[in-house]
Image (cartoon, rainbow, N blue to C red):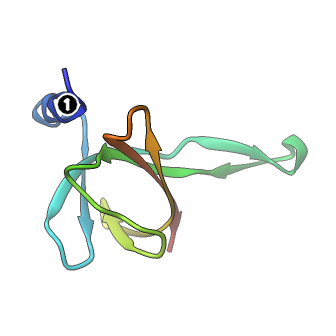
Amino acid sequence: MDVTTLYEAARNAGLLTAVTVAGGPVVHCGFRAPDETVLDGFALSRDYQLDYPAAWLTLAAGDTVEVAGAAYQVRDVRAIGDGTERRASLSQL
């Protein structure tokens, strides 16, 4: 099974989040906001991330996306696994 088929199944099951790229269509992605320990364990910080098939979306550092009414700026985009999936690190604006 390829990554696009997996994401389509997740979208159809309602497991993905609608994401709007400035000036573009809505794309469903895996949105995560895990807490990350910073300052030697004295504080927590949110690390916002989007996971998506590379065939569905092209993002680059500096792009702006909207997730659930909140705006985020792409900090970094990395390939996952064999390169057919991407993970974008985000900063909330």
Label 1: few (<14), some (14–19) or many (≥20) C-alpha neighbours in 10 Å: some
Task: Point out the residue furthest to the top here.
Answer: 1
| Residue 2, image quadrant | top left
* Residue at 26%, 69% in the rendered image: 21
* Residue at 60%, 51% in the rendered image: 46
**Amino acid type, mark 1:** Ala
Q: Position of residue 50 (x, y in %)?
A: 40, 50
Q: Is residue 16 toward the left or the right of residue 8 in the image?
A: right
Q: Position of residue 62 (x, y in %)?
A: 47, 76
Task: Point out the residue furthest to the left here.
Answer: 12
Quadrant assignment for the N terminus: top left
Q: Position of residue 42 (x, y in %)?
A: 87, 46
Q: In the image shown, does 39 or 5 lie closer to the viewer?
A: 5
* Residue at 28%, 49% in the rendered image: 54
Secondary element at image label 1: helix
Q: Position of residue 3 (x, y in %)?
A: 24, 31
Q: In the image shown, does 61 or 23 lie closer to the viewer?
A: 61
Q: Is residue 81 toward the left or the right of residue 4 in the image?
A: right
Q: In the image shown, does 1 or 68 lie closer to the viewer?
A: 1
**Tag count in the figure?**
1
- In the image, is residue 57 above or below residue 73? above
Q: Which residue is mark 1?
A: 10
| Residue 8, image quadrant | top left
* Residue at 50%, 46% in the rendered image: 33
Task: Point out the residue furthest to the bottom here.
Answer: 23
